[in-house]
Image (cartoon, rainbow, N blue to C red):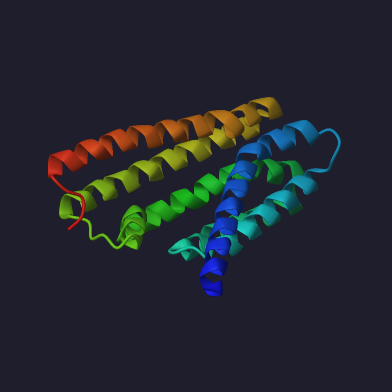
Amino acid sequence: MWSTVSMHCSTRRRRASSILLAAFGVAYPFIVLGAIDVVSPVVFVVLALAALGLRLAWSKGDPGGGIFSAPFLAVGAGLLALLFYDGMAAAKAYPILMSLAFAALFGWSLVSPPTLIERFAAITGAIPTEPARRYMRRLTAVWFVFLLANAATSWWTALAGDVAVWTLYNGFLSYLLIGAMLGIELVIRRWVRRRTKGWAG
């Protein structure tokens, strides 16, 4: 009984932590914008590294979460390398490196199947049908291209030199685009399911 209660509590804590870390990702550009004149850029990098450390720790407790270890470690290494070059560049690079790292993860799964989306679908125990696999592969490719484009745009806003522009895109517009992508994908997925008369075998 106590082990079951403990497991439920652990799951709740993990979910709460995931929500808080996601909120930090959204808030991070606004933190930089609001505090850039009063604190060193090093502080922002330390905050980003701490968030990455927590993401890494919590992802290991989720089914399939270990696949995110490499991207999180790569982003952390990139931030530390940039910190020795330019503190402000490192602070602005956090969202750029996150997009690049996940683009690499999606791209890697395209050349080393099953694709990332199929791996997560498999966690539920379902066996995708062949039409579903083809759809998941195309969707993986779409997210790969989107994340590369997002990283390029984020990089451009960082080079623009205006922190307000960088904040607007990385703290609002990029998430708006991600939300639009998810909404469109949900509609298309339902259409594919009806057309193929099933999703899993």
- Identify which residue, 168 or 157, lies in the foreground: 168
Q: In which quarter of the image is residue 120?
A: bottom left
Residue 68 rendering spot, x and y as whole percentages: 50, 59
Residue 63 rendering spot, x and y as whole percentages: 44, 64
Give the total of numbered labels. Answer: 0
**Residue ID at (20%, 40%):** 192
Q: Quadrant of residue 78?
A: bottom right
**Residue ID at (75%, 53%):** 84
180 left or right of 171 in image: left
Q: Quadrant of the C terminus?
A: bottom left
From the viewer's perspective, is residue 146 above or below residue 81? Answer: above
Residue 134 rendering spot, x and y as whole percentages: 21, 50
- Identify which residue, 197 or 170, lies in the foreground: 197
Q: Quadrant of residue 3?
A: bottom right
Q: Can see residue 77?
A: no
161 left or right of 195 in image: right
42 left or right of 76 in image: right
**Residue ID at (77%, 31%):** 34
Q: Can see residue 21?
A: yes
From the viewer's perspective, is residue 136 above or below residue 120? Answer: above
